[in-house]
Image (cartoon, grey):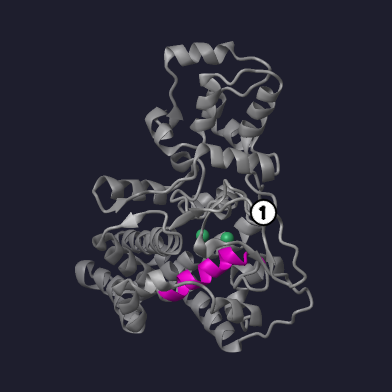
Amino acid sequence: MASVTPAKTNVESKSETETVKKEDYEVEDKNFEREKVKTDPNFKRKIVWKNVIGFIFLHSAALYGLFLAITAAKLLTNIWAFFVLILSGQGVLMGAHRYYSHRGFKASWQLRLLLVACQTIAGQNCLYIWVRDHRQHHKYSDTDADPHNANRGFFFSHMGWLMSRKHPKVIEKGKGIDMSDLEADPFVMIQKKYYKTLYTILAIYIPTLVPYYFWGENIYTSLFVCYFFRYVLMLHGTWLVNSVAHLYGNRPYDKDLKPVENLTVAKITMGEGWHNYHHAFPWDYRAAELGYRDASLTTQLIDFMERIGWAKDLRTASCDMVRKRTLRKGDGSHTVITESTAANKNGEILTTNNKRKSSLITDKNHQNEKLQNGHPAEDAEQKKKSEELTNGVPRIRKLESPVIRNKVFNRG
Ligand SMILES: [Zn+2]
Ligand SMILES: [Zn+2]
């Protein structure tokens, strides 16, 4: 459920919780009313040694799994492990993240069942807890109430938070996260109730036993490659979004948000690296402004689900919403929007072509129509108009080169 929040004046508050001003163009979910709690730099976190030992064991087993994958495993076993990795990845990315946490689209019962099963394979706790932590992460992003507060550094936001006692603010604010929609979903609640059993069957037994029974793989090789190595690889992929995509990159959409745009993370995580955009518009099912060209397999798979009738009502931020937010709050690195707007302010009339440039980078349907072989197509008339443009306004053709494309957003 989205609602347009009317413009309000800033709320002056002396309490540590500060309500952030919301503009009329900011459409927010009730779960994502941005609140700020500070980060206490003097807070001493307590290490949970049991978890530290567990992670040391898990990583040692994963490294041995990597060794076996290179030296002993059959090719089919490695292909199978990769397949399970992608499947569990989609359980987290499409399932836990874009669907259950942010409701970026509506899903049929078949898709929900598939996503809950795939998320179980990922072994990142049950959906209910995953989603609660993630909604809390958005609501209190990079503060003491954020479970993986990136202001505590790379290691803490990557995996250190799982080896530390929760900050009292995380426990306190976690109780206020609205989970009623998940509580109404029988698949989620059944998974929560029988999580350990389901996890043992779906994440350990099946991935390990398939290579053993079907192509005679050694059972230990299968266990270390298809469970330990595959599991830890997926964990680090997910953690990169919490660490690297909150620390290293630019903020074209909202410089007041700590999350950044990071191409490398986007490639590794099948499209979750455009994190400044994602935190600015969390309910956009694409988790990126540019969809297909931004290394987003997850977005393509959601589009596929829509085509077969398993997903519908895909939500995207409108061109105007993105443009206004970028101009008002971006760090200036979104040169396509900032330069074309500056040119318009200098007296140039907003031509159809200029409008198209704006929609090119924001409107999914328009983009799908115009993309040919991954590049925007121009018909003869628009091409002619484009060539008539001067005054340094960026042309659509410039976006065709990935190098220039990266420069546009400083995504080295
Ligand atoms: Zn984040
Ligand atoms: Zn999110």
Residue furthest bottom as drawn: 50
| Highlighted magenta segment, given as a residue range | 128-142
Beta carbon at label 1 within 8 Å of ligand 1: no
Horizontally, residue 219 falls left or right of residue 323, namely left
**Front residue of 295 and 330:** 330
Question: Which residue lies at the image location 42% right of the left edge and 16% below the top edge?
Answer: 379
Which amino acid type corresponds to the residue marked 1 in the rendered image? Tyr
Horizontally, residue 359 falls left or right of residue 223, namely right
> In the structure shown, which secondary structural element does the residue marked by tag 1 occupy?
loop
**Front residue of 390 and 65:** 390
- Where does residue 262 sit, x and y in percent of width and height? 59, 49
Horizontally, residue 173 falls left or right of residue 129, namely right
Q: What quarter of the picture does the N terminus occupy?
A: bottom left
The residue beneath circle 1 is 248
- Where does residue 102 sit, x and y in percent of width and height? 45, 60
Q: What quarter of the picture does the C terminus occupy?
A: top right
Question: Which residue lies at the image location 30% right of the left edge and 63% below the top edge?
Answer: 112
How crowded pointer 1 is (Cα within 10 Å; few <14, some 14-19, many 20+) is rated as: few
Task: Decide whether the magenta segment is chiefly helix, strand or loop.
Answer: helix
- Where does residue 148 sit, x and y in percent of width and height? 61, 70
